[in-house]
Image: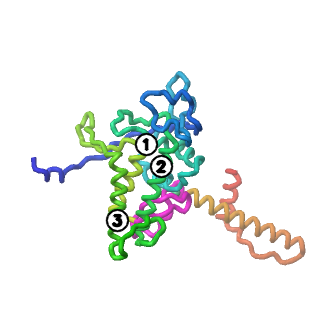
Amino acid sequence: MAYTDFDALAGEWRRWTWPVFQMTLERPAPRELLHVMPPIPLATHPDGMFVVAGFNAPEPIQPARVYDPLEDAPRVFAAATAIDPADDAALLLFVNTWGLLGVSLEPRDPRDMGQYWESVFLVRKALAELRRLSAWLQAMKDGRWSDPALPTIDVPLAKRIEAYRQRFAVDLNQRLRRSPIRLELELDTFNPLFRPKTLADVLFIHLWQHARDDDTVARRCEACGGLFFVSSTNRKRRHCSFTCKNRMTRRRRYRREQAERRLQRIATKDRIGGQKAPQVQVATKKNARQSTGRKRRA
Ligand SMILES: [Zn+2]
């Protein structure tokens, strides 16, 4: 077999589901979990552990929901890069929305349906690394070579761009070494399939996929503050997802209505005072409809 046969290596991403369990942050970790087999990595770390609610109940624990992390990769990526890894409440919200990262699973661990617990420190560390690398990539894609997101390297100015790119590849490779893409055969069709194993893999593979592409840029979502990748010619897109776009639209509408109400109050006061009311933009049909809609929801 010629090595060039590998040029034809092709397959599809296997769709799979990742569970989201209801988690609590336990610090220190419950004593019962210090002796489970296989041992939980960093179980005694002072940062504590994310533990599934009702972990010591006899019956199997059902996830709050399951979802396809490949389909939702851009949203999970935005959520993961939006949070401050030092913020425990934000980390807990993340794992309760998207599930544990699976960073404490060893590469050869057969479990791939997520776990009931994970070291807070390891989740923090993985998300900090993702945040660091994605901000670094964003700066490079934008050509901001003196951005604080870039690490300090002791290289002459002329060679700095090359050095930053190489160092980025080394650092991302370091991370990807731990989370290889697995190859599988589809059971009935024998179609070749690729699959990540954990949620953390999905996040770093997303970064890997968008690192090379010269015609995409990384932008911060105006609603959630997370990063998303978009074609560099697409000047209009400012949100990571429809969810964030809708949230922003509602927020803007709410602010506009608040401003209009304030103006209306001033106008009423002025009329009572016998003065001429200022022009207030509230009378359009569209505004009237939106106002009532807002009231019904509130
Ligand atoms: Zn967003």
Question: Can see residue 263?
Answer: yes
- Identify residue type, mark 1: Val
The image quarter containing residue 192 is top left
Q: Residue furthest left?
A: 1
Please tell me which residue lies in front, 130 or 10.
130
Residue sitting at x 76%, y 66%: 262
Dot 3 and dot 2 residues touching (CB under 8 Å): no
Q: Secondary structure at mark 3?
A: helix
Residue lying farthest to the right in this orientation: 273
| Mark closer to the chain start, 3 or 2 | 2
Secondary structure state at the residue bearing disc 1: loop
Q: Secondary structure at mark 2?
A: helix
Is tag 1's residue or tag 2's residue first in the polypeptide sequence? 1
Disc 1 to disc 3, how far (Cα)? 26 Å
Residue 228 shown in magenta: yes
Taking the spot 40% from the left edge, 42% from the top edge, the residue there is 198
The reply to whether discs 1 and 2 touch (Cβ–Cβ < 8 Å) is yes
* Residue lying at 52% horizontally and 56% vertically, measured from the top left: 82
Numbered range of the magenta stretch = 217-245
Circle 3: residue type: Arg
Circle 3 sits on which residue? 165
Give the x, y percent position of residue 95.
52, 43
Res 125 label: 2
Residue 218, position in %: x, y? 43, 63
